[in-house]
Every structure is written in C-alpha cells, then in structure tokens.
Amino acid sequence: MTLFPAFLKLDGRRVVVVGGGRVAAAKIRALLDAGADVTVVAPEVSDQIANAGVVYVRRPFEARDLDGAWLVVAAAPPAVNRRVAEAAEERRLFVNAVDDPPNASLYLGGVVRRSGLTVAISTDGRAPALAGLLRQALDALLPAEQVERWLAEADRLRAEWRRAGVPMPDRRPQLLDALVRLHDSRPRPADESRA
C-alpha cells in the first residue's frame, strides 16, 4: 500500500477524538497546537484531557458524534475503533486509529518541527516505532539556527522568482546554489576553520 502524504489545515475545524486515556491525550496536544476545535468522546477521560481545554462527552461512542467533524482520531479498544471507522467511512471522514492499522484510513508519522520547517516520517502504518526513531535522528541532525537562515533565503528567492517569472524547474538549482553560499559563509569555530 502506498500512502499519499499531506499536511492538514485544522485551525477552527472540528476534530473528534474517541478515547479518554494517555494515547488520546498525546494526540490532543498536537491537534490543539494546530488550532483544531477538539471534542473528546469516552466513558471516562483522564485528568489531563479534562484539563486540556477541550469539549468532552463522558459516554460511549455513537455514530452521530462524527456529524460535522473534519477528522477523527480513534484511540480506543479495537472493537470501538472499528465502529468509529465504519461511521467515519459513511461520512467520508479520515480516521487515525492509533496503533490499529485495520481501522485507520489516515496514518500520522513522526514529526520534526524546526523554525517553520516540518518533516514527517511514515512507514505506511507498518512500524510506528521505526518512524519514531527516524524522527529522533532527524531532530538531532537538523541545526535549528541554519534552518531559520535557509527558510529566510528561500522566502527571499521565492519573492524574487515570482517577480521575475522564473520557471519552476529553474528554481531548485538556484535555491541549492544559494544554500551552499549560505553554508560556506557561516561563522565557524576556530578549530573547524583550521581543519
């Protein structure tokens, strides 16, 4: 199975999270950071969820809970996740069923964020732990101060290209040249300069 990678604008959009435990709480933080309007449905919710500033409904999941939602996160036992997936399919909603690939139509990857750059890693739902390890490796490798400079230069060049009507195929080599110049001109520690 080949998945289509995408980034979603969730600001102000209703997202339903089914499940009230630790896994649901972890997903809620990222949804709130993206500006989503989160509703949690679960017979019991953790204190962390109760204090997260989300709407929560303390009862078992019902299909109508998905009405008006843009996205669903199922963080419940597999039998509940299956009911969530069926209700979501009827409404043409994507479901992230946490660690439950048969009931998911959306897989969330490991994410690295740095100064406006977002890198997501997916194993197509096969090995979430591997995606997590790769995320940690990339997080350690990406230099925060450099990424900010790269993005600023890319912004500057993009505006210039638009004004000049530079064709898309010509832009990437020009950006690469600009980034190499930035790298070559960066200040270096004394011992690195001598090497």
Image: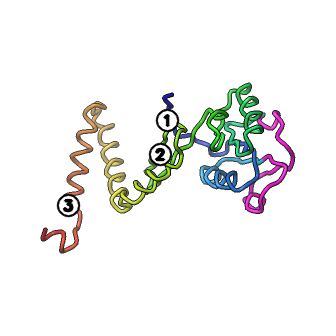
**Which sits earlier in the primary sequence, circle 2 or circle 1?**
1
Please name the residue that numbered disc 3 is placed on: 185
Q: Is residue 55 left or right of residue 23?
A: right
**Which sits earlier in the primary sequence, circle 3 or circle 2?**
2
Instruction: Establish if 89 lies above or below 172.
Output: above
- Single out the mark in the foreground, 3 or 2: 2
> Measured from the top left, where is residue 155 in percent x and y?
36, 48
The answer to whether the residue labelled 3 contacts the one labelled 2, judged by CB atoms less than 8 Å apart, is: no
> Measured from the top left, where is residue 29 in percent x and y?
64, 55
Residue 70: name its quadrant.
Answer: top right
Query: Outermost residue, left direction?
Result: 194
Residue range of the region highlighted in magenta in the rendering: 41-66
Q: In percent of the image, x 19 and y 58: which residue is there?
A: 184
Residue type pointed to by label 3: Ser
Q: CA distance from mark 2 to mark 1?
A: 9 Å
The answer to whether the residue labelled 2 contacts the one labelled 1, judged by CB atoms less than 8 Å apart, is: yes
Q: Is residue 70 left or right of residue 34?
A: right
Q: Secondary structure at mark 2?
A: strand
Residue 105: name its quadrant.
Answer: top right
Q: Secondary structure at mark 3?
A: helix
> In the image shown, does 131 or 120 lie closer to the viewer?
131
Residue type pointed to by label 1: Pro
Please name the residue that numbered disc 1 is placed on: 5
The answer to whether the residue labelled 3 contacts the one labelled 1, judged by CB atoms less than 8 Å apart, is: no
Please name the residue that numbered disc 2 is placed on: 120
Instruction: Establish if 85 lies above or below 98.
Output: above
**Which sits earlier in the primary sequence, circle 3 or circle 1?**
1
> Measured from the top left, where is residue 127 in percent x and y?
52, 43
Residue type pointed to by label 2: Ala
* Label 2 crowd (10 A; few <14 / some 14-19 / many >=20): some
Q: Is residue 157 left or right of residue 181?
A: right
